[in-house]
Amino acid sequence: MPAERLIVPIPSLRRRSLLVLAGAALAGGWALRGAGAWDESQLHSQMAARYGEPGLRRLQAWLEMLRTQSGLSVAQQLQAVNAFWNQQLLATEDLVLWKEADYWATPLESLGKGAGDCEDYVIGKFFSLARLGVSPQQMRLIYVRARVGGIGSTQSIAHMVLGFYETPQADPLVLDNLVGSIQPATQRADLTPVFSFNAQGIYVGGQRSAPSDRINRWQDLQQRMRKEGFDAL
């Protein structure tokens, strides 16, 4: 789908109704009580102004999903968050969506567009789970080579998945937009890890090798999220 069709303009006569809808959502109990401070009024206002009613409804659906998952088991939260983002975003490329070779979208931007690439799925899942109280230390954004074309194929693509580690040395569970089910990494023979990172650092071969502030796009992402109303890591 062309990027232009994913952007819904907001006629001036509709702005007031969209802001009323955002305010009603907050008054109706969308606000969360999880870790970190999100300015949900600002999130709703920005979504309404930048992406219109479709984006606003996706934002509300995200906040409602988080609200209903609050207090449930981590296993249930992993399933719900993985399914939500896989269903909400249309897989596309940054060149199509953002006219840039590599752009890391904030969750607000991804929901606003209703589309994203592999990094955008992972970012949405990472911050969703962190919002639900899953420790960021238990998650890593993992760069992999993903084999495509079925068993026996030698073709692979650069890809990113989210790994959840029950313990630091555990076989991580893989949350992926290419495969809907959550599986242990040892069962994903189609994936070859390259390196991973989280707020604590960059990991190569399972060992921390450098601080995560070396990844400029990660720092830029969090700065943009704070401007939108998120309390990033």
Image (spheres, rainbow, N blue to C red):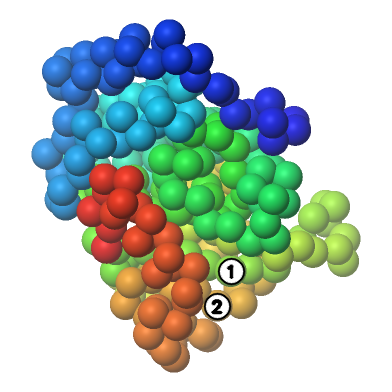
Nearest to the observer: residue 111 or residue 82? 111
Residue matched to label 1: 143
Nearest to the observer: residue 125 or residue 44? 44
Side of 166 where 178 appears, left or right: right
Question: Does residue 166 appear in this view?
Answer: no
Residue type at mark 2: give it.
Answer: Phe
Residue at 16% in and 52% down: 36
Whole-percent x, y for residue 134 in the image = 25, 54
For the residues marked 1 and 2, what is the alpha-carbon distance in whole angstroms? 6 Å
Label 2 sits on a secondary structure element that is strand
Nearest to the observer: residue 82 or residue 21? 21
Residue at 59% in and 37% down: 115
Residue at 57% in and 23% down: 8
Question: Mark 2 and mark 1 in contact (Cβ < 8 Å)?
Answer: yes
Question: Does residue 5 appear in this view?
Answer: yes
Mark 1 crowdedness (10 Å alpha carbons): few <14, some 14-19, many ≥20: many
Residue at 43% in and 8% down: 13
> Is 168 situated above or below 31?
below
Whole-percent x, y for residue 175 in the image = 50, 51
Mark 2 crowdedness (10 Å alpha carbons): few <14, some 14-19, many ≥20: some
Give the quarter of the image for residue 64.
top left
> Is 230 situated above or below 15?
below
Whole-percent x, y for residue 59 in the image = 38, 29
Residue matched to label 2: 195
Residue type at mark 1: give it.
Answer: Tyr
Label 1 sits on a secondary structure element that is strand
Q: Find residue 210 and name its label.
A: none
Which quadrant: the N terminus? top right
Side of 143 where 233 appears, left or right: left
